[in-house]
Image (cartoon, helix red, strand yellow):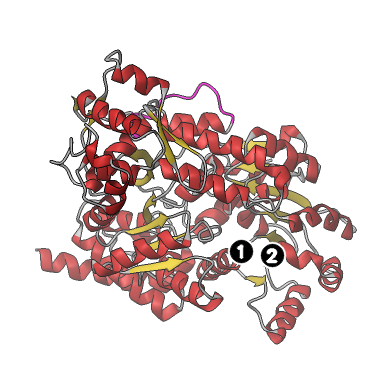
Amino acid sequence: MTIDKELQILTTYFGYSSFRTGQEQVIRNVMNQNDTLCVMPTGGGKSICYQVPALTMEGTVLVISPLISLMKDQVDALHQAGVAAAYINSSLSANEYTETMQRAALGEYKLLYVAPERLDSTTFMNQLGQMQIPMIAIDEAHCISQWGHDFRPSYRNISRIISLFEKKPVVLALTATATPTVRKDICNQLGIHDDNTVMTGFERANLTFSVVKGQNREKFVKEYVKKNDGEAGIIYAATRKAVDSIHDLLLKNGVGVAKYHAGLSDNERQAEQNRFLNDEAVVMVATNAFGMGIDKSNIRYVIHYQMPKNMESYYQEAGRAGRDGLDSACTLLFSSQDVQTQRFLIDQSLDSGRIPAELEKLQSMIDYCHTETCLQKFIITYFGETDVAECGQCGNCTDTRESSDVTEDVQKVLSCVIRMGQKFGKTMIAQVLTGSRNKKVLDFGFNKLSTYGIMKNRNAKDISDFIEFIISENCLTVENGQYPIIHVSERGKEVLLGNVMIQRKGTVVLKQLTKDDPLFEQLRALRRKLAQEAGVPPFVVFSDKTLQDMAARKPKTEEDFLEVIGVGQAKLEKFGEAFMREIETFSAVQT
């Protein structure tokens, strides 16, 4: 079959002249009534795979989506594009729910978004059974698998709703992060044939990955955010305490920052999320409770202040950068203490049967933090792809920092650890090395050791960072337990004997992610004003990629404006005149 009609819809409603890799194949499949699994990276355009067919099919496409925020963003964006859509979730009042379902029953919507938990309601299921549902799209489909990193039991109900309808709807499952085991489980659960799996690859060519070890994390974050002032970013931390600490640090430095974790009330979380989505706060500091289903396209960087528990979580969270296709950065700040934190969190899991598998996944994450090979290749290989080329742009591929021989200083630290009986953590070790008069140091008699004060020309924080570096070099190991105790490893013993030399690279140089463009900044300001008037987040009006293209093209006519990436007929009519007037004013001032 040809999909000329679908391509015309893509152009008219969404402003794109061609489909991205994999989209056309998925659309052909579902239009041919083939149940399909679509695996595309975050930002790969999965929503187009069901939104475009919905506009050609008779009836209402049902979209099962796990988060309220995702539903609202997608429905807002569809309304801006001139598409009739609605959502059913707990944010609706009883009257709003009744009205929405009545309109859905009359076939007034092309897409209806629902939470998986809604499928537990017999009343709702009966109402669905009376509707014409040509397709069921299942977003974040990895949630259906017990092997997935975000398993949700309510997703198991999806397979049984298919039997509700006289004419079976075509099923489309979509996910960005699924290992071969998870993909197989999704297909088994939903009865999807292996031949109908469409994978476009896990590579995100516009993302640059890097791992930073042995540096002061607070200083790094503070300087990074300052260097990229005005660019939207997410900083993930593993604990509420860390989120609060980073949030306060940035706030004191005059950064427009929001925070999000389970310790805040529902209203507080929603308010903070809205500030970030509406560009009122430029940086979001959050635990992994934030972000799933967040459709904000102009996030330029994601920093992981602490290592996450598995590669699936990391790639999904890091992948929230650069959804608009523009160059963006993903940085992981590694400390050995992160391993203890994540092991503790895994041990607190309610399902003890899942712990061994989670520890195995954690080890892959640790390996990622220590690899010296291409970081993007490591990630893509983890998800089951083979013959992967090096990306040539990640922190490892482009690392040109000069190395210096630090063997002598490493030997001083290792010697001190041994003389202290290998029974203490890095704080106490750093105090002994710097010659601290701390009461505990004196009580233990460590001031009498030959290594006491041997590095007094450096401060304790600097020594602590250096100990982190030595741990990352596998010369020291950290014992699990309530208090992380440091031991000298077999490799460390070889260093002490002079058989192994240790080189340390210089500090990572921070880069500005985007170039200054006065017209682009003016268009961003106009976008924010129009978004506030429309009651939607700025990225729903236009993405940064669209604004960049607009700033380059400087359209003067409606025909010119339609040539801009991401501009369809509905958005031309709503926003074209205002943006062209802004460009004309800017150009007049320049000449």
On residue 115, the disc is 2
Direction bottom: furthest residue: 95
Q: Residue 436: x percent and y percent?
A: 21, 48
- Left or right placement of residue 473 versus residue 402 in this view: right
Q: Is residue 18 visible?
A: no
Q: Is residue 268 above or below residue 446?
A: below
Direction left: furthest residue: 591
Q: Is residue 427 above or below residue 108?
A: above
Q: Name the one closer to the observer, 490 or 185.
A: 490
Residue at (43, 44) in percent of width and height: 337
Amino acid marked by disc 1: Leu
Badge 1 is on which residue? 67
Q: Residue 31: x percent and y percent?
A: 71, 47
Q: Residue 579: x percent and y percent?
A: 31, 69
Mark 1 and mark 2: Cα distance apart in space: 7 Å
Residue at (24, 60) in percent of width and height: 229
Residue at (42, 67) in percent of width and height: 259
Q: Is residue 421 visible?
A: yes
Q: Please give the range of residues in magenta.
A: 384-396
Residue 7: in magenta span? no
SS for tag 1?
loop
Mark 2, residues whose alpha carbon is within 10 Å: few (<14), some, or many (≥20)? some
Q: Mostly what secondary structure, the magenta segment?
A: loop
Residue at (57, 33) in percent of width and height: 383
Q: Is residue 311 above or below residue 157?
A: above
Q: Are marks 1 and 2 in contact (CB under 8 Å)?
A: yes
Quarter the N terminus occupies? top right
- Left or right placement of residue 406 versus residue 175 in this view: left
Quarter the C terminus occupies? bottom left
Amino acid marked by disc 2: Ala
Q: Residue 378: x percent and y percent?
A: 47, 30
